[in-house]
Image (cartoon, coloured by chain):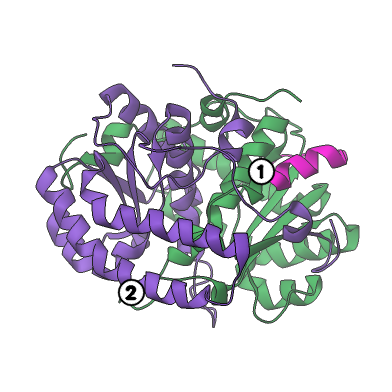
Chain colours: A purple, B green
Amino acid sequence: MSDIGLYDAMSTLRAVRRLKPDPIPEAVLERVLKAATWAPTGGNTQPWRVILVQDEAKRRRLQELYIGPWKQYAKGHSAGIAHLEGEVRAKQERMIAAADHLAEHLHEAPAILVFCFEPGRMAITDAGLDRPSVVGGGSVYPAVQNALLACRAEGLGCTLTTLLCFAEPEVKSLLDIPDAWYTCAYVPIGYPSSKGHGPISRRPVAKMAFRDSWGEPF
Amino acid sequence: MSDIGLYDAMSTLRAVRRLKPDPIPEAVLERVLKAATWAPTGGNTQPWRVILVQDEAKRRRLQELYIGPWKQYAKGHSAGIAHLEGEVRAKQERMIAAADHLAEHLHEAPAILVFCFEPGRMAITDAGLDRPSVVGGGSVYPAVQNALLACRAEGLGCTLTTLLCFAEPEVKSLLDIPDAWYTCAYVPIGYPSSKGHGPISRRPVAKMAFRDSWGEPF
């Protein structure tokens, strides 16, 4: 296995939503999962686990649970882009079409990674603040990002979704997830059936980073 | 700049808490910040920003705000490892000593990255569930992880901390962060004064990953 360059992997990791059903070799899956384990977590407690779902009936059930929340989300998203024009709008519409495809074909991905976490093992430092808490995510999404980057390295398409949190009780029952554990990321993976990884669209550093004070250009 | 291999970077990215005050070249900082911008976010909204704090007075103030929450956390952590023995305990004690050093010298790091997020731009799919929400973190910690990996590539020590969320109102005031934005990650960076990056201790894949059902070995 050749080790892709770090910056090369990061700068070409994009959501790949059209996947072939072809099986993924065990050694490849192992490298993707191992990459996830390398991620940092608060106090190195590693308060996450991942279930690799390959079972056909379970993938089908995940697809059935996914389609409803996706259609709901897509409706809102479509309304939100109605004011856009030209290439900006066309790009959004292509994204929606690809995500529609994923929602219809989720079960055809040869594997779906379901990341779980246990809040009891996390020091959630923003739990007491009067705003949505996100810090628990700091001990699991770095692992998810490592897995996504490893997929990129292995030529596997993937995308991070969280819509199945809307059906979390059903997912927990389907996958025998213990009471104290919950789900936070769902990553269908498979070899790309279309273009796969490549250039990404992101805001430039000048719009994302400041120096010393909010609003001061980096 | 040479591009380190992805797996090489991930597998040797460890918390580096002893940092030299030496300045970091602008081109290096730019690459680290650019790597962060490449990360995926829900709906590609990129609902995060980062403030690179180099101003000496502001770093000093962040250190003053950090030391209290750290001492509180360390007290709990020390109690939690009191039952451990031998090398396992010694390793925890070395971690605490390094983190103590960081807390005393935070302001000496040449730069501190303060990651901010705007919940209003996030679809937090687990907000309605009867358990701690983490999904908002899915649109910012992948960017943080990219920044950490880029630091690794550049030979910069770094570590992700969230303890300053306990002092978030003071931090927001110090850095002029708008009302609707909050903080979720603080990353002091600098060249290592001690060993720097290297081997990491993580649970093996067999303990972190299951196949098809919770508890079923991968």
- Residue farthest to the top, as pictured: A1
- In this view, B47 is above or below B207: below
Residue at 45 percent of width and 62 percent of height: A136
Residue at 59 percent of width and 51 percent of height: B143
| Crowding near the residue tagged with mark 1, few <14, some 14–19, many ≥20 C-alpha atoms within 10 Å | many
| Crowding near the residue tagged with mark 2, few <14, some 14–19, many ≥20 C-alpha atoms within 10 Å | few
Tell which subunit mark 1 falls on.
B
**Which one is in front, B125 or A85?**
A85
Question: Is A19 on the left-hand or right-hand side of B53?
Answer: left
Residue at 79 percent of width and 69 percent of height: A214
- In this view, B193 is above or below A218: above
Residue A72's disc number: 2
- In this view, A186 is above or below A37: below
**Which one is in front, A85 or A126?**
A85
Residue under pointer 1: B35
Residue B179 shows in this picture = yes
- Residue B217, image quadrant: top left
Query: What amino acid is at disc 1?
Result: Ala
Which portion, as a residue range, is magenta?
B17-34
Q: Quadrant of the N terminus of chain A?
A: top left
- Residue B146, image quadrant: top right
Is B21 within the magenta? yes
Is B196 within the magenta? no
Alpha carbon of mark 1 to alpha carbon of mark 2: how far?
A: 32 Å
For numbered disc 2, what is the local secondary structure?
A: helix
Question: Is A124 on the left-hand or right-hand side of B128?
Answer: right
